[in-house]
Image: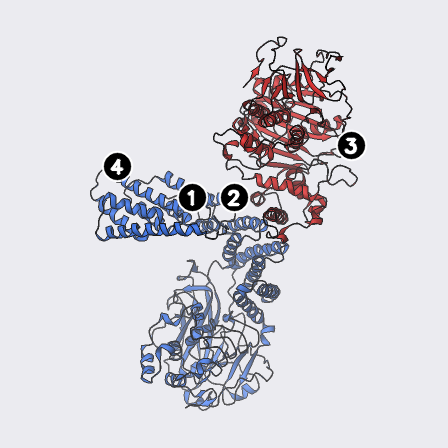
Amino acid sequence: MHGRPRRPAKPEDEGAAAAKAAKLRDLQGQVLHNHHSRTYTKEALGLSFKLLEINPEAYTAWNYRKLAFQHNLRDLSDPEAIKSAVDDELRVVEVALRQNPKSYGAWYHRKWLLNQKLAPVDFKREFGLLDKLLKVDARNFHGWNYRRFLARFLGVPDEEELKYTMDKISDNFSNYSAWHNRSILLSNLLMQQNKGFESKQKIFSEEFELVIQALFTDPSDQSGWFYHLWLLAQTSTPEKPRLIASWPSNGAKLSSSFVREKVEQNTLSSIWCYSLQERIVPIVLYFDEPVKGLNPSSVKLRSDLVFAKDIHWRPLSVTDSGYSNCWATQLEIANEWNDLHQFSVEVSIPCSDDIVSRSGSHYNCPVHFSFSIELMNCGDTAEDIDLFRDPISWDCSEPFQPHGINNSISFDQLKTSSELVQEDSKWHLERLSDEIELFRELPDENSKFLKLTLARLLCACAAIKSRGRSLAERKGYCEEALALLSDLIHLDPSHKRYYEDERSLVLMDQLTCNMETFMKHCSVQVQPNSAPMNHVQLCRLSLTRIGFAERLLWVQVLDLSHNSLRSVEGLEACQQLVCLNVSNNQISNFTALESLTKIISLKVLDLSFNMIGAHSIDTTRYICSSPFSHKIEACEAFEECQQKDINVEDYWEAILFFKSANLTQLDIKGNAVANKENFRTLVLTLIPSLKWLDGECVH
Amino acid sequence: MAEAGAGSAPDDYPSIDPTSFDVLICGTGLPESVLAAACAAAGKTVLHVDPNPFYGSLYSSLPLPSLSTFLSPDPSTPPSPASTSDDSHAVVGLDRRSIYSEVETSGDPPEPSRRYTVDLVGPRVLYCADEAVDILLRSGGSHHVEFKSVEGGSLLYWEGNLYPVPDSRQAIFKDATLKVTEKNVLFRFFKLVQAHIAAASTAGDVAGEGDASAKIPEEDLDLPFIEYLKKQQLSPKMRAVVLYAIAMANYDQDGIDSCEKLLTTREGIQTIALYSSSIGRFANAEGAFIYPMYGHGELPQAFCRCAAVKGALYVLRMPVAAALMDEEKKNFIGARLASGQDIMCRQLILDPSYKIPTLDVPCDGSDSDLPRKIARGICIISKSVKLDSSNVLVVFPPKSLEEQQVAAIRVLQLSSNLAVCPPGMFMAYLSTPCADGSTGKQCIKKAIDVLFSPQASDGSEGHSETTSESSDDVKPTLIWSCVYVQEITQGTSGSLLSCPVPDENLDYRNILESTKKLFADICPNEEFLPKKSAPVHADDDSDSAE
């Protein structure tokens, strides 16, 4: 059934094919005619049967048979007659399946018939049919789909179906469908806590043991590796969602202004927050898995400040699923104040049924943190802070001078590790460490699955380490994973991009996981006439994507130039970001920058020397999580552009991006799009606040 | 079929007409029967006689009560007629001999003992893909035999325990006793061999087109197999699995000083190729091996029937008393039957129980100093050695039982589904080649001790068994056993042919090879059992198994 080479067509086949085609055309014509004229006689039905016997893919013929069946059923009242009508129809399906066991139409027709519930279903016959079919091709996923359908229909316990998958795997473990069904059944059984399935750890240990037997026996067979991947995902994802980072962090002191002397002496104790000038306090919460259900009742706020309007939590994500790792709200300060004044804000997330993860787990790690806000009278600070009087320059030629960041930024922002979590991750870690030891012994030097799985195991271990306190221990894991991924990039060039992305994640993890290494990339930038800003520089690292944004929530100036970024997804979490440099990367469209539209404080953006507009038809945008095309809220911007003679069809993507960008400085030279007609007009029209475009003062 | 003489008194021999045949064969063992079928198919006139009242000679399956007389025959055989000289030819008396010795029986045969059928050639099986099966199919003999598979697979005795033999991808996957790294190494070796076999077979079709890189290099093929296995990093246990349970080596491959035959990689891979093509040849056969229902004695009978269909004449209970030689005593030209009748023939073939009169040609096995004996054992046991399996093969690699064990011991357990014993009982055959009988017998006894537990002496086995059987790891109880030694003689060629005796191997490959050679001597220009010799009625592969 599988792995059989196609044999080249012989000249005599051609004649046969032509004869078959003529016969089919004739039959099809007659069936269609009957369909239109609603002829449901025995002869007409016979014709449709003949057609389906030769070509089970004739979907209209199946629909015709459904209509005919329902039509003819009206005249039947005797249960025996109905049963025989159903049986006849079932037989038609069987004949069609003999011709093509993977005919969607035929399988659907059978399910439809059974769902009519006109006659008692002969389950023995149905399962017999399936057994025969799966004997011929144990991997026929239609068969497996139908089996799941029957099992549900009949109420076969999942335990029994699980046994069946084991039988099939014992016959031949190269069976994606059997492994897949196993993963589904186990998920159900564990969720329902059936007898014998109470302990996830026990079940998964056994499953690991089982799949390891297949992997070691024949490492070149993919099916087992896929199942292992599922097991790994089950073992390494947390069981309950937890908050892993927030901005502001616990104990942070925010300030709307600063005292210049303190900056110069590097004794500043508070963080200058740009948006406070606009009387806005942003709060960002970062969870270890996507959740939904954050609202004023699931996240409680207490403060001596008065906030305007209802508090609205929004997911920071470019997909529309409603689930997100990262949630943000903007509190508008409604108070009036006179002198320097300090206010406090307390945030607490109790155990909550509102907050749920994709797998349906509720949030049950109560967290409480607080921060304070120093507010000065608006009038006093206005002249001091004019960030954008001169264009911000990203001078890469100057060696980066890491500065000590004041201790108001901490890496382990939250202390949430309870005993329960510790106990839990201990098992995960042991399990994963065992796997790593085992796979290191597998003497298959060039197996890409082996290398990839090992890299994934190492990353999973590193991730678990981060949940505890031992961030430093991850470094070893990261280094080994990096070496493996670099090997894979050479070994398996057709999946190069995937490996590069994975490598970027590990690299970012490695660079940011402990204070010591991260500090080499951090500084406090003090621009003339502006506030000191927290600056992170991650240049020339061949990064292709952003990861571990939860460790960058506090960054105000971020330099990612001279990498290989294809997208900036993830940066949406960095709500403090004011200046971003992604010049000299591989961004090829505006869709890949969609995350940036969610950062309200972003003022300075350097996109120069990317590949935006380099391809007239750019398909890579569809790799992005959520292409702009899903949204139509930009009508006004489109109209505005049309008035200026800008071709909306050509520029819809750019329009959607710039209409929500509130920039003062933009660099976009070195992109094909920048040289196009009207592009400059478009930018100036859509960003009225823009002051500097490609180094030129425009306002 | 022509079966003259059946039912008449032994001394009241029928006279045979005509009195001249192309081929006269005495003895209905497997090689003789195959020769009879082949000669008859090649158009020769054949007279096939047998001194016994049953078919099979040294290859027969006997009812249990007849075993002891067959193994230790009454020495009072009628003296062969004195050598005389006739006017046209010389008469040389033929003596018979027993190739069995040191027969030792213990226990009382269970009743009804006639329902137990014992093989003289055991332990023996057929590979689904071996030549014996092909010949059966070609000759039409398959219509007269039914097979069942040795569905329980093979077990290997290693360091005091029995382990399943992982002989396929799935078996390796399922084997709970193997370490995962062992699984990896073993399956990698299998894949290497499979790629080699595939490459070698395509290279035959289209030169250069097959993936030549998949082939095992020539210098490795000439290496002793064990060295190659070591090179592939197989652990000692895995080497034992491959050498003794899959490549079916008889003699110790590890002994540095042993001058016994060392298997080369080429030979080893040949057997593995046969083994793997056997798995799955017949849809209803599980595993690589099949066994004929009612015992191995059915096989010679099937070929005799084929011969009879082609016109061979059969006379049982008819010993040959003397051979007839021409004047110069250079050639045999016929034989005098026990009835006194002289039959003339171009070719005289005798089964190996006849002593060949010394002619000009010396016929000793001077080419080797291999142990020319086999110790065999037959046991009746009450329970299977492997849970939920009826027919099982067990292999004891050399030296696994004791230092003196120079060769592998193979055990074949058969169940009542082969109609060789009553339901609930099992037969077990053991054999090992040996240099001297007593050492061989000692090894067989040791293997019996390891596999089975002796019967409770007080005779109250009924009760003790029911209590002990509740736990699964209790060994099967030995009810009856017989251990004996069989000589191995080589077949001879010339105008009087002697066929090979049952050898030390698990299959019939070597025996058929020598038989084919004998046939080539008799009919130099004829094809051996060509396909057209089979009767025309339905003849698909599937009916030969099950």
* Residue nearer the viewer, B167 or A569: B167
Q: Do the residues indicated by labels 2 and 1 lie within the same chain of the protein?
A: yes
Distance from disc 2 to disc 4, alpha carbons, whole Å, reads: 42 Å
Q: Are marks 3 and 1 on the same chain?
A: no
Numbered circle sitting on residue A80: 4
Q: Quadrant of residue A363?
A: bottom left
SS for dot 4: helix
Left or right placement of residue A351 versus residue B470 in this view = left
Looking at the rendered structure, the kind of residue marked 3 is: Asp
Can I make out residue B99 in this image?
yes
Q: Are marks 2 and 1 in contact (CB under 8 Å)?
A: no
B508, above or below A252, in the image: above
| Tag in front: 3 or 1 | 3
Q: Amino acid at mark 2?
A: Ser
Q: Residue at x 78, y 41 (%)?
A: B256
> Going from the N terminus, do you reach mark 2 or mark 1 first?
1
Which of B102 and A454 lies nearest the eye of the viewer? Answer: B102
Q: Which residue is mark 2?
A: A170
Q: Is residue A643 left or right of residue B61?
A: left
Read off the chain for label 4.
Answer: A
Residue at the spot of label 1: A133
Percent across and percent down for residue A208 are 54, 51
Q: Which residue is mark 3?
A: B369
Whether callout 3 and callout 2 share a subunit is answered: no
User: Which element type, helix, strand or loop, lies under badge 3?
Assistant: loop
What chain does badge 1 belong to?
A: A
Q: Kindly report the distance in space between the C-alpha atoms of the residues bearing marks 4 and 1.
A: 28 Å
Mark 4 vs mark 1: in front: 1
> Depth check: A279 or B345 in front?
B345
